[in-house]
Image (spheres, helix red, strand yellow):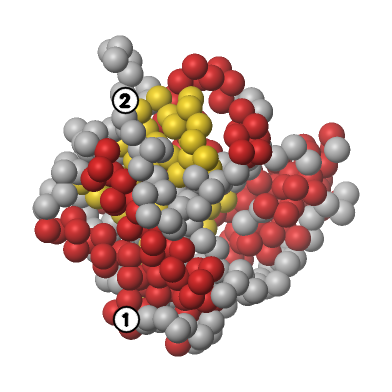
Amino acid sequence: MTIDDRGLLAITGANGTIGYASVLYALHVGYRVRCIVRREDVVETIKAGPSIQQYAGKVQYAVVPDNTVPGAYDTAFEGATKVLHVAGVWPKPNYHPDNEIYYPYVKSTENIISAAQKSGSVRRVVITQAGAGLISPDDGDTLGTAMNKVLNEFVPVNSHSASIQPPIPTPHHSYSAAKAYCMKYLHSLRSSKKLPFSIIQIIPGTVIGPSELVSTAADASARMDRMSRALLFNDPKPRYAFGFINVEDCAKVHVEALDEKKVSGDEAPPWFIAAAESVQGKSGQDLWKEAGDYVEDQLSDGIDKGLFTIGRDNVPLNMPFYVDSSLTRKMLMEGQGFKGFAQSVVEVGRWYTRLSEHT
């Protein structure tokens, strides 16, 4: 190990939005990275990324087709000192709530912990969570847009969601239940102090930003986050918003949370909040209007050309939280602020514009 080598970091979901950005940031700050994906063809997709090619000698790959089977990650974690678990299950409407959402998420999380224990080398595991674990799916679309509840590093898991067990009625219920259960389960493991490694959990807002793995405007449109699509293309209102985070900021939070010198296991809060801070007392309508004004001003050429139709009224149906991520910024970002929602959407719009001009 050279003085510049921070050890081997295993990253699940390495081809995803958060995952790939985290791979690049981790390589930049000195880690060797083992990208863990579910399909062989995805390896070639990652290798084709322009920025990763300069680090080719520091990147390894492991394919785990089914992360729910016992021992799924055992080989993939061999020799790793840190693990970043980003891979998850998105609650698509056609998915079976139990068999394709709840059990896969819960079992894969348990397999992460088991493999880290067996490795004998892993010292820290960082796991991505979601705001869905903070609300009850039975509330439906009644949470409103007042943004009058605080989303900070000590926000509690929703106890009702954590208690939901299969059979589960809908994908939405299943996703909230799986996230809430795993957040409590991991927090309990961490509090027990019986593991040979520390556990850090991160709750990101909607992740917004371009990806260099995308080469066409059509692909960019298909993979774009729902907030950007609603604002740039007048798509229907998103259902939930639990804050917003630029993809590069999100990656930095995840990778810096691996640093045991920066954050000891005992000092870390229950979860870090990867989301730009919002102003208490400002509603979702206020935030969306300000973003619409800024995007319209910055992307006026694209609007004139018909690339964009600003969705000024597409405020997400449920925006219950304002974000206070000050502790996360202090501990992981040297106090620096996160890029805001409007700035990040403009970044996405400019990326889409460039792709439209060349495809």
Label 2 SS = loop
Q: Position of residue 246 (x, y in %)?
A: 51, 47
Asked whether the viewer can see residue 320, the reply is yes
Q: Residue furthest right?
A: 305
Q: Position of residue 150 (x, y in %)?
A: 33, 69
Residue at label 1?
A: 163
Of residues 308 and 76, the one nearer the viewer is 76
- Kindly identify the amino acid type of the residue bearing the numbered disc 1: Ser
Residue under the image location 86 percent in, 38 percent down: 359
Q: Earlier in the sequence, mark 1 or mark 2?
A: 2
Q: Position of residue 184 (x, y in %)?
A: 26, 67
Residue under the image location 26 percent in, 65 percent down: 185
- Kindly identify the amino acid type of the residue bearing the numbered disc 2: Gly
Residue 7 has which mark?
A: 2
Q: Residue furthest front?
A: 70
- CA distance separating discs 1 and 2: 38 Å
